[in-house]
Image (cartoon, helix red, strand yellow):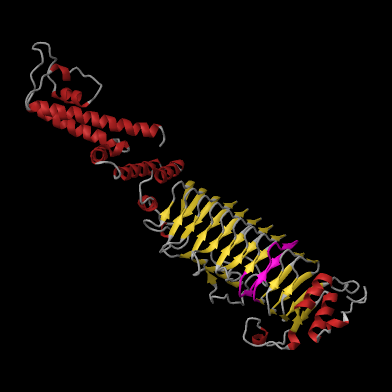
């Protein structure tokens, strides 16, 4: 460095005119703009070569950041550089950078190396970056990377971001390990905004902690190179995870952000439409995640192969909004998840074999649109290729909690019918009989109908063929109505059944009435017991 206070660059640096402008702008806290005024030639992602008038050496940038000159009196030093071509590798690993840093529309010749460095705020907007290495990076304020194109991955493992992490409209390609963003153990104090982002590789957020919300609205995660496009087990989001549609400012799907970090009215998103849904091509893993407010899948699209999963095992959230497009392949796994409100629609869930939810617990169902009980039972059947009672019992409990007792009984009846399929032949036949007569006790009104029919048949038969008395002179007056009713009703004695002695065909009729009476009584008692125990 030069002598303290003079602000000149060391003579051996031999600054170019672009570097001298950057040096002076740093001392002023102003912006060094190296644009030439032609939008096509100023595009850092375009094919035009940038000449020496726009080139600054990475060692000069690093010198300003780590040991820059004093600011001019009354000014605050800051590196605000626009339209520059930064040559060689920008390496400030382990350094402490106090000035504010904002790089816009810049093109980097080599990777940016920031591991274990400390920044106040770092903003790199619409830059072309070969690779960003920033493991264990620490910022007191923001880390903004909107509209950047990163050709070989971003590494933010165990990074700590003091306020917001911004990746809106960023395009990230995979590194050598097939990962686009490696951010395991990342901590963001406030929001992680990655709206309309394009990720080509695995986006890894294992064990990450987000202090407010994580938004992937309108993003496209594509990983044809591996099983998962998003790998985020043990993710903690204090508020809401948004995997929903996004659109331009003032559109119904706008997140409310404004340029330069949102999408303005005059801009066109990368996929060329005003509204873009969240799209995931590949598997997604959110196992053991904790979400303070909600997980929102509204309008989301999942494109999976047969062996890929949307895995939500053991997540915990007050609200799950499963309102996306039905996956055509792959599986949706909700095993062990705990949800208070389940907001869903019938067209969002996969069919038979595509949904697993053993141990999935929810309290309240809030269907969006037409979702009758018949379709809800198909939803449970799709989740249980092999019989399991828990999904039926969970659905019944949820319906009962909202006062829909009749629907809850229908669900439990469906459970008994499904269970019957697993029983041996004898038990299956007994189950058919219970179902046919009184629907396993869940429709006790049927018992009264059957009782009335059998009573009428018995009364008619014994009116035409009265049995002789058991003991002559001791039998009560003959009454075929009371005799048939005494045979049908178990336990209750009307002093008729024991006074007469049927023979021949009357014996068989009496036996059928007695047996039918016991079957009806036991099944009704079983149903009443279930109702009393609130199953």
Please identify the quarter of the rendering in which residue 30 is found. Answer: bottom right
> Along the horizontal axis of the image, is 117 left or right of 279?
right
**Residue 459: image x %, image y %?**
14, 28
Foreground of the two, 489 or 130: 130
Tell me where residue 56 sits by quadrant.
bottom right
Q: Quadrant of residue 62?
A: bottom right
In-image side of 2 versus 188 (left or right)? right
Residue located at (80% from left, 71% from top): 65
Residue sitting nearer the eye, 460 or 300: 300
Between 242 and 450, which is closer to the camera in this rendering? 242
Nearer the observer, 422 or 114: 114
Is 162 placed above or below 87 here?
above
Residue 143 lies in the magenta stretch: yes
Q: Is residue 239 magenta?
A: no
Q: Quadrant of the C terminus?
A: top left
Residue 218 visible here = no
Taking the image as shown, residue 25 lies to the left or right of residue 220, namely right
- The magenta-colored residue range is 129-153
**Magenta: predominant secondary structure element?**
loop
Q: Which residue is at the far top?
A: 473
Q: Give residue 439's position: percent from left, percent from top.
A: 29, 39
Please say if 421 is above or below 209: above
Residue occupying image coordinates x 20% and y 31%: 516
In this rendering, the count of numbered labels is 0
| Image spot of residue 38 (x, y percent) | 68, 88
């Amino acid at each position: 460095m030069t002598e303290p206070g003079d602000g000149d660059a060391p003579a051996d640096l031999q600054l170019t005119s672009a570097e001298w402008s950057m040096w002076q702008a740093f001392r002023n806290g102003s912006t060094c703009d190296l644009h030439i005024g032609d939008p096509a030639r100023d595009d850092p992602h375009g094919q035009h070569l940038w000449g020496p008038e726009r080139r600054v050496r990475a060692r000069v940038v690093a010198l300003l950041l780590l040991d820059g000159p004093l600011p001019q009196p009354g000014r605050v030093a800051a590196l605000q550089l626009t339209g520059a071509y930064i040559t060689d590798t920008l390496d400030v690993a382990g350094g402490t950078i106090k000035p504010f840093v904002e790089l816009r529309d810049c093109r980097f010749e080599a990777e940016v190396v920031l591991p274990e460095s400390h920044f106040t705020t770092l903003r790199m907007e619409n830059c072309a970056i070969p690779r960003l290495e920033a493991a264990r990076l620490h910022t007191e304020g923001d880390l903004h990377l909107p509209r950047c194109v990163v050709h070989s991955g971003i590494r933010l493992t165990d990074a700590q971001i003091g306020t917001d992490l911004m990746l809106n409209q960023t395009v990230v390609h995979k590194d050598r390990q097939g990962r686009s963003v490696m951010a395991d153990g990342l901590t963001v104090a406030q929001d992680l905004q990655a709206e309309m982002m394009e990720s080509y590789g695995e986006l890894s957020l294992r064990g990450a902690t987000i202090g407010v919300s994580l938004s992937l609205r309108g993003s496209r995660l594509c990983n044809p190179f591996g099983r998962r496009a998003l790998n985020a087990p043990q993710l903690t989001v204090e508020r809401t995870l948004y995997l929903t549609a996004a659109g331009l400012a003032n559109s119904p799907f706008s997140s409310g952000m404004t340029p330069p970090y949102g999408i303005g009215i005059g801009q066109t998103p990368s996929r060329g439409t005003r509204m873009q849904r969240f799209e995931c091509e590949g598997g997604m893993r959110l196992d053991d995640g904790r979400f303070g407010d909600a997980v929102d899948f509204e309008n989301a699209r999942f494109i999976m192969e047969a062996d890929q999963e949307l895995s939500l095992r053991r997540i915990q959230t007050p609200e799950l909004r499963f309102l996306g497009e039905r996956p055509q392949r792959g599986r949706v796994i909700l095993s062990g998840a705990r949800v208070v409100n389940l907001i869903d629609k019938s067209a969002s869930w996969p069919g038979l074999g595509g949904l697993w939810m053993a141990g999935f617990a929810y309290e309240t169902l809030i269907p969006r649109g037409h979702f009758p009980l018949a379709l809800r039972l198909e939803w449970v059947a799709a989740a249980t290729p092999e019989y399991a009672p828990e999904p039926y019992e969970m659905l019944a409990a949820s319906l009962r909690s909202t006062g829909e007792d009749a629907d809850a009984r229908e669900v439990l009846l469906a459970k008994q019918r499904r269970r019957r399929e697993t029983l041996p032949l004898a038990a299956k036949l007994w189950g058919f009989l219970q179902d046919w007569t009184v629907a396993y006790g869940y429709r006790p009104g049927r018992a009264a109908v059957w009782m009335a029919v059998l009573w009428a048949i018995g009364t008619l038969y014994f009116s035409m063929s009265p049995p002789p008395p058991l003991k002559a002179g001791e039998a009560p007056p003959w009454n075929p109505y009371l005799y048939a009713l005494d045979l049908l009703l178990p336990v209750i004695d009307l002093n008729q059944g024991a006074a007469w002695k049927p023979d021949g065909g009357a014996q068989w009729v009496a036996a059928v009435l007695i047996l039918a009476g016991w079957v009806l009584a036991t099944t009704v008692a079983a149903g009443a017991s279930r109702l009393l125990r609130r199953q």
